[in-house]
Amino acid sequence: MNILHVVGARPNFMKVAPVLHALKKHDGVSQVLVHTGQHYDANMSDVFFEQLGLPAPDVNLGVGSATHAKQTAEIMSRFEAVVEDCRPDLVLVYGDVNSTMAAALVCTKLGVRVGHVEAGLRSGDRSMPEEINRLVTDQLADLLFTPSKDADRNLHREGVSSDKISCVGNVMIDSLVKLLPHAQWEPKNGRPERYALVTLHRPSNVDDVTVLKTILESLIEVSADLTILFPVHPRTLNRISHLGLNAQRIRLLEPQPYLSFLAMQRGATAVITDSGGIQEETTYLGVPCLTLRENTERPITVSLGTNVLVGRNPDRLRNELAKILGGHAKKGSIPPFWDGRAAERIASIVTGKACPGPAFPTHVEDQLTRV
Ligand code: UD1
């Protein structure tokens, strides 16, 4: 069986790693890893491959940055040749980035089966580019691997047939579970005892100068009570550098490698973010998360986890942070199937066989060995 994986952007890498490792345990499976090149900076891509024990991509399409239409079209036209050349039995796509949708579309047109890992999540907000990517990918996919039951319900509502859907759990949490023990060895780099960890990159928050300014002003206010560590995404850095940010207690950092960012999340007093994956990771870690969005495609992190949506309302951010600092942070629990074994379940379904051993290599040395 020939399986081709497509990844392109940072959040894809921690999702593909456990699946690729789990499939490696099965005899008779050959795997090809395609990187579209949507993310190309070493600290957005290479370092994740290294820490997650991923092999160097067999193919890098090198598409780079562009408008949505150009980036999507470029991925499609370059990827089509790869699929025609490899003729895989199955293509696995991950998450909700442009690379995910572009690859699914190419395969469907070529009559190649597609599996979507992290299917069924919906924010209900079609102004979000990722929501369009999710809707299109899920309509096209032949196998839909969901992280939680709310995702199954979304798919049923959209008419996706039940026999295509498998609730396998959260593959991003698989990577976290395996690598968290190693994150404790990460150097502290002068981190204070108490701090808020901030990430910000959603177009709706950073592309409009007025919105970004309001958010930064709220963060400056927060920094009066709590030091802020802010690893800045390249998209956000572009915008901030135009605005100028003069706040002594906000430490702007480079995008962090996976292990270092896990260590920072685990040690944080609070995480303030607009990321999707970080809402999940903080729920697993039991760390309070304040999400700077009006909606989430991951409602289970609110209903069961530690996540609170504060939107872009400075008063809500202030109030929720005061609760956390006053020792009244929201308590949460870990959602069902977020147990580090989602990838094993995917591998079993794809191959039709039970997983013959632990899905992920056990030692860091193994992880760092090229597969
Ligand atoms: C993409 C995904 C988003 C995901 C995020 C994680 C889509 C539609 N969006 O958003 O879902 O949460 O990745 O980071 O697929 N840039 C660099 N170096 C890089 C990559 C990007 O400098 O390695 C800069 C470029 O100026 C680029 C901008 O960041 O224009 C945005 O990159 P892009 O891949 O278009 O989208 P993200 O905002 O990263």
Image (cartoon, rainbow, N blue to C red):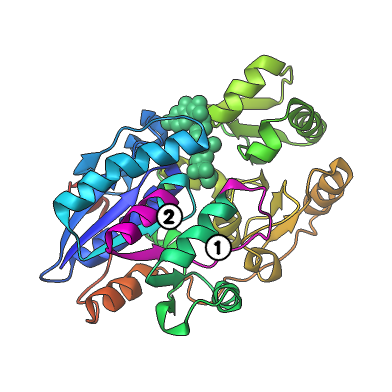
Side of 77 relative to 202 (left or right): left
Taking the view exactly as shown, the residue that stands out farthest to the front is: 109
Side of 52 relative to 266 (left or right): left
The quadrant of the rendering that contains the N terminus is: bottom left
Q: Is mark 2 within 8 Å of ligand 1?
A: no
Say which amino acid is labelled 1: Tyr
Q: Earlier in the sequence, mark 1 or mark 2?
A: 2
Side of 258 relative to 214 (left or right): left
Residue nearer the viewer, 260 or 156? 156
Q: Give residue 108's quadrant in the image.
A: bottom left
At mark 2, the secondary structure is: helix
The residue at 39%/52% (across/down) is 14
Bounds of the magenta span? Answer: 101-129
Q: Which mark is residue 180?
A: 2
Say which amino acid is labelled 2: Leu
Residue nearer the viewer, 278 or 8? 8
Q: Position of residue 66 (x, y in %)?
A: 47, 29
